[in-house]
Amino acid sequence: MSRETVISVEGLSKKYILGQNKAGSGGLRHAVEDLVKAPVRWVRGEGKKAPQGPNEFWAVKDVSFSIKRGEVVGIIGRNGAGKSTLLKMLSRITEPTEGRIGIKGRIASLLEVGTGFHPELTGRENISLNGAILGMTQAEIRKKFDEIVQFAEVAKFLDTPVKHYSSGMYVRLAFAVAAHLEPEILVVDEVLAVGDAQFQQKCLGKMQEVSTQQGRTVLFVSHAMHSVKALCTTGILLDQGRIELRGPITEVVAAYSGHAPRRGDPSTLASNRSLGLSLVNASLHQTEKLGTLIVRAKFQLDRPISEAGIGVHIETTAGFELCYLRPETTGLRFGQRSGELQVEFELTSLSERLGAGTYFLGLSFHETNWKCCLDRTPVGEFVVPSLDFYGTGYPPKFEKDGAVVLPVRLIQVG
Amino acid sequence: MSSAASHSVLTSESAQDFDLWIEAGHTEKHYWRDLWRYRELLFILAWRDVAVRYKQTVAGAAWALVQPLVSILIMTVIFGKAAGLPSLGAAPYAIMVCAAMLPWQFFSNAVSTASQSLVNNANMISKVYFPRLIVPASSIFVSLVDFMISLAILAGLMTWYQFWPTWRIITLPLFIALAIFAALGPGLLITALSVRYRDFRFIIPFIVQFGMFVSPVGYSSELIRQKFGEGWLLVYSLNPLVGVIEGFRWAIIGGDARFFSLGTCLSLVVAAVFFVVGISYFRKTERSFADIV
């Protein structure tokens, strides 16, 4: 297989002007005003409007890299690191402000599953619609139709409007269509984080098949370090719009997972600008009581939120997700809030459930309907102290016994 | 394993090696080829809009007929009977109104649905690449389907009044193409403007309402000439719809309708200007749609 360069990114940058979408500032009145004032400015010899410094925000700044044919690249980084913006530029959805991208071959992007799905249409109809939106021809769709239906496991409901589908079926069908795209370069954003565990595994398998057996070039963004490690050969670590590390995937994941949380840093840990929400700071405190961890976090909400909750994400130092405690499951939630929000909660009996060792903790913020507004943001690491759980004098340790501690008792020996 | 440093070093490939360059302010070389490649999407989006529109309605597709039919009746009663305006030659007033109402309804539906099409499909725009022109074009195609259905009204009225068309009816497809051409310009222009300035959502209904009265829909443009003279008729013909509607009347009514006149030419020139301005403005702004929609 020739290892020629199929993607070449050179000095790529993307600038957003903050607050542009707010009512008034970018509206028709301003445009008309601008148009009327233009001759005056021209006479005075002033150029276009002076650039507004403080409102500028560089989502991606001066990023350069190249990708070879058949390479499977994981793009990782914290929220707001510029991953999605980078993918959007690669997929031609948004235009770069500076720099350029060279692409060789057909590129397809999958930034969301089920783009363009219409609830009133049946499963069969949505396959055609979604396929066409993703760039498949109807002939291709007809050819793959049976395969798609089989993969999605929805054969019985093919002629039912998808509004009657369960969310699992919906996601399965949506992924199935996307999985049967056959571009030379595939760009995928976080779409595996949907559906149940079994289906996620199936998706992962399909992705592996696409990349290894069919030799396609894949760019993959995910927060799930275990899938990134399983799929990718090399990685790119982004931080605040710049490349922090480009190299073999193990090194990149290690660099990301070991990313020390900035304790007491005055700037925010993560923010979702479009939703007006940021995680200002978070700290972990181990208490006197063995295996209890107190988490304190401060959020800043720029708008009132009617129902909110916090998700807790725990992973191993290698980046394997142990659990993701969602607010609708745990009840870690509260009613209407706005402005500054301080949250304190505790995790108990850690030593009875986890092997002694170091783990990473991340927080997420969910809004009404448990939509995730701030995805798993790493906030720090904690140490699970050793506990002689089995009473054998050998407390379970993470390195030897694994992450999970399970009670086991001898019943009979024959 | 290669080191991180060697990966970030740029390989100096020459520009010709890549099929596609994405950069700021770069007009796509393959734009029209891409548009052709995505032609199926145009029809599928149109099909989606048609398939979804009449779901959970009792009358279903009959709604495509009701709206123009009622408008024609009202126009005929008010302008023809109450105001006593003259028809064109021997044609019954209702048929004269119908010949204009159908292209007008097509135009106004096309412009108003196209203008909201990108905003309504914002989710798609921000997640997938395809030539953005596909979205408003598919809206216009849907309006064309409605138009084709509403031709049944014309056939019905002609049968009712026993008014038979001349050979000119075979030129009708030409004027339908002209109507599409005239709708594309303002349609694309307003679509592109609506993405940034949502004000157009409120401006459009006003334009549509106003437009019907400054176009020869409820009356013939002959009336303008008789009441205001040739000079004002030319000013009146700055409305691109005048040429289209005159063409429809010429093809459908025959005998007394005029098509080949200075006014009609002027009106078609205005339509062509709109077409060029619409497409170029759309292409100029479409690259930033995903950022502002």
Image (cartoon, coloured by chain):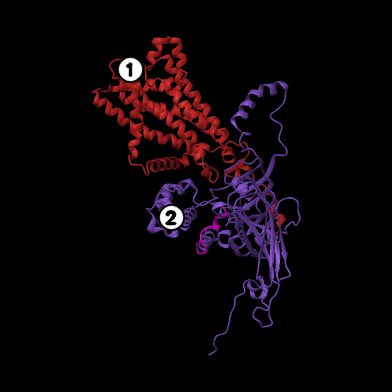
Q: Which chain is purple?
A: A
Residue designated by label 1:
B82
- In this rendered view, identify the residue nearer to me: B251 or B140: B140
Picture layout, residue A308 above or below residue B207? below
Picture layout, residue B58 above or below residue A222? above
Contact flag, marks 2 and 1 (Cβ < 8 Å): no
- The stretch of residues the image draws in magenta is A189-199
| Quarter of the image where one finds residue B51 | top left
Q: Tag 1, which secondary structure?
A: helix
The kind of residue tagged 2 is: Tyr
Residue designated by label 2:
A165
The kind of residue tagged 1 is: Ala
Q: Is disc 2 in the same subunit as disc 1?
A: no
- Single out the mark in the foreground, 2 or 1: 1
Q: Tag 2, which secondary structure?
A: loop
Mark 2, chain letter?
A: A
Outermost residue to the front: A335
Q: Which chain is red?
A: B
